[in-house]
Image (cartoon, rainbow, N blue to C red):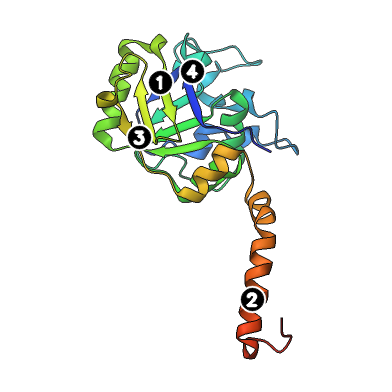
Amino acid sequence: MPAPLVRLHAIALPLLRDNVDTDELIPVAENTRASTYGWGDGLFAAKRYLAGPGRAPDPDFILNRPPYDRAAMLVSGANFGCGSSRESAVWALRDHGFRVVAAISFNETFKRNCIVNGLAPLILARADAEDLVGDIERDPFAGVSVDLERLELSHGSHRGPADSISFDLDPFYRALLMTGQTEDDMLGALQPTIDAHRHAMLAAQPWLTSWGP
């Protein structure tokens, strides 16, 4: 079960490019595990490590540079997570320590994979994403604050309400992230209400089924 996520203040990785695809996030050669955990080392593997045997970090790749090597949030461009439906792309982000990806838009399958694995996909306007990345690059140590309850995001150096960025998030997905529940958990909790409604409906309209209430 994913850990609940209500508020987060974290170092953010600025990666403001469009069309970051799942093969870049987790190359196909890294897809060798049967478990859904332990994928963090494979994140961005083709860019993160120097060519040759072993996994020598490439110092020029941003994820290897402090403080971005401690990032728990990623800010990117349009169509993030495109290319394939491989869920391991989300597992790699999650296992590396990311809890939030803020982007201009997402591949729909990737976005849903984020939700079921406790990773918040937040949609920003391009101007807001560009402003946020500018703030991060000027002062990465200030971090970025995300509040799912207030649906607000702000750079650590601008905490006032006037400086916050509002985002939208489907209420059902938001509830899953804030409670750390899966869809099955939430439907299970609602089962008595669903059963009561079904029995009441069938009692009032028994012609709807041959089984009755």
Which residue is painted at 47% across and 40% down in the image?
81
Which residue is painted at 60% across and 44% down in the image?
116
Residue 79 can be seen in this image: yes
Q: Name the residue under label 1.
A: 144
Query: What is the spatial separation of the Cα atoms under label 3 and label 4, in whole angstroms?
Result: 16 Å
Residue 136: where, in percent of width, then height? 35, 17
Residue 178: where, in percent of width, then height? 55, 38
Q: Which of marks 3 and 2 is nearer the N terminus?
A: 3
Q: How crowded is mark 4: few (under 14 residues within 10 Å), some or many (20 or more)?
A: many
Q: How crowded is mark 1: few (under 14 residues within 10 Å), some or many (20 or more)?
A: many
Query: What is the spatial separation of the Cα atoms under label 3 and label 1, in whole angstroms?
Result: 17 Å
Q: Which amino acid does label 4 sit on?
A: Leu
Callout 1 secondary element: strand
Residue 145: where, in percent of width, then height? 42, 23
For residue 200, the mark is: 2
Query: What is the spatial separation of the Cα atoms under label 4 and label 2, in whole angstroms?
Result: 56 Å
Callout 3 secondary element: loop
For residue 77, the mark is: 3
**Dots 3, 2 in contact, CB < 8 A:** no
Q: In this view, does 79 lie above or below 16?
A: below
Which residue is painted at 26% across and 24% down in the image?
163
For residue 63, the mark is: 4
Which residue is painted at 29% across and 25% down in the image?
161
Q: Earlier in the sequence, mark 1 or mark 4?
A: 4
